Structures are given as structure tokens and as C-alpha cells.
Image (spheres, rainbow, N blue to C red):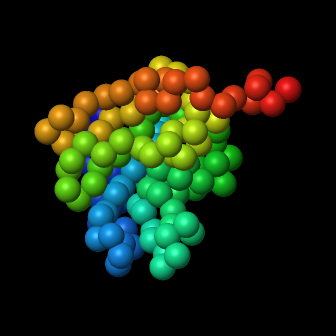
């Protein structure tokens, strides 16, 4: 995961965070090994802000990818930040419960998506 974490760290350097000053970067690897990165982009009304994970996933999906292998998330504070609930739900749309999510920090490590968001809303529930 070291290479993916480095990509996430590089990504947070481009974050636009004039309000919170909390830079986050994410890097997601597709099934074919392509890596997409994203950074958080804030907006004055906050609700239109975009999270690093959703930016990375959006770019991958826009390029035709819907199968993913792993994700790394880092903040400039290196505080072990995990994806928020909204980003977890987005990940769950494309990834299984055992999808690895690496976080950066002293207490960092690798989580499984199913542990971060158990009993998520799935496509099957909508039938």
C-alpha cells in the first residue's frame, strides 16, 4: 500500500481548503492497476464541497472503471482519517465488504470497507 499512500499524500497537496484548512487526498486503484487520485475541494456553502475519495472515484468511473482493488486516504495532519459515511456508501456501490481502505497516521492501518460501513444500502435492497 506504500505506493498508493504516496499517491494520496501527493494528491492532498492540490486540495482547495480555504475554510477548514484540512487537506485530504485519496488514491484508488482499479482492477487493471490504474490509479486515480482526488483531493478535497471546499465551497463556501460547505454542502457543495467534494471529498477526496469521491473525486478519485468519479474520475475513475468517468473513464469507464467500476471495479476497484484498494484505496488509500491521507490528510496533511496524518491523523488516520477514514472516509466519511457518504464516501463509504459510494465505495460500497462498487466494492465488496472486504475492500481494503488504508489510512495514514500513527494509529493508521488497513480497514475492510464492511467494517467501516456495516449493513450498507445496496442495489439489491432497491428491488
Q: Nearer the viewer, residue 95 or 81?
A: 81
Look at the picture and state if 115 lies above or below 71.
above
Q: Quadrant of the N terminus?
A: top left
Q: Residue furthest top?
A: 98
Q: Nearer the viewer, residue 22 or 74?
A: 22
Q: Is residue 117 left or right of residue 7?
A: right
Q: Is residue 127 left or right of residue 50?
A: right
Q: Residue furthest right?
A: 127
Q: Residue at position x 47%, y 57% from top?
A: 51
Look at the picture and state if 40 lies above or below 82.
below
* Residue 14 in sight in this render: no
Q: How many marks?
A: 0
- The picture places residue 119, in percent across and down from the top left corner, at 58, 23
Q: Is residue 7 left or right of residue 35?
A: left
Q: Residue at position x 31%, y 63% from top?
A: 23
- The picture places residue 69, in percent across and down from the top left corner, at 48, 30
- The picture places residue 117, in percent across and down from the top left corner, at 50, 30
Look at the picture and state if 18 lies above or below 102.
below
Q: Quadrant of the C terminus?
A: top right
- The picture places residue 61, in percent across and down from the top left corner, at 64, 48
Q: Residue at position x 48%, y 79% from top?
A: 44
* Residue 90 in sight in this render: yes
Quarter of the figure with residue 15: bottom left
Amino acid at each position: 500500500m506504500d505506493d498508493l499512500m504516496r499517491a494520496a499524500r501527493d494528491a492532498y497537496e492540490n486540495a482547495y481548503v480555504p475554510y477548514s484548512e484540512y487537506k485530504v487526498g485519496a488514491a484508488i486503484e482499479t482492477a487493471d492497476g490504474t490509479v486515480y487520485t482526488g483531493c478535497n475541494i471546499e465551497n463556501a456553502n460547505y454542502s457543495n464541497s467534494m471529498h477526496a475519495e469521491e473525486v478519485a472515484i468519479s474520475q475513475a468511473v468517468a473513464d469507464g472503471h467500476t471495479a476497484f482493488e484498494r484505496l488509500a486516504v491521507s490528510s496533511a495532519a496524518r491523523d488516520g482519517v477514514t472516509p466519511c459515511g457518504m464516501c463509504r456508501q459510494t465505495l460500497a456501490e462498487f466494492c465488496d465488504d472486504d475492500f481494503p481502505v488504508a489510512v495514514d497516521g500513527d494509529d493508521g492501518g488497513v480497514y475492510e470497507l464492511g467494517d467501516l460501513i456495516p449493513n450498507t444500502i445496496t442495489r439489491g435492497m432497491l428491488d
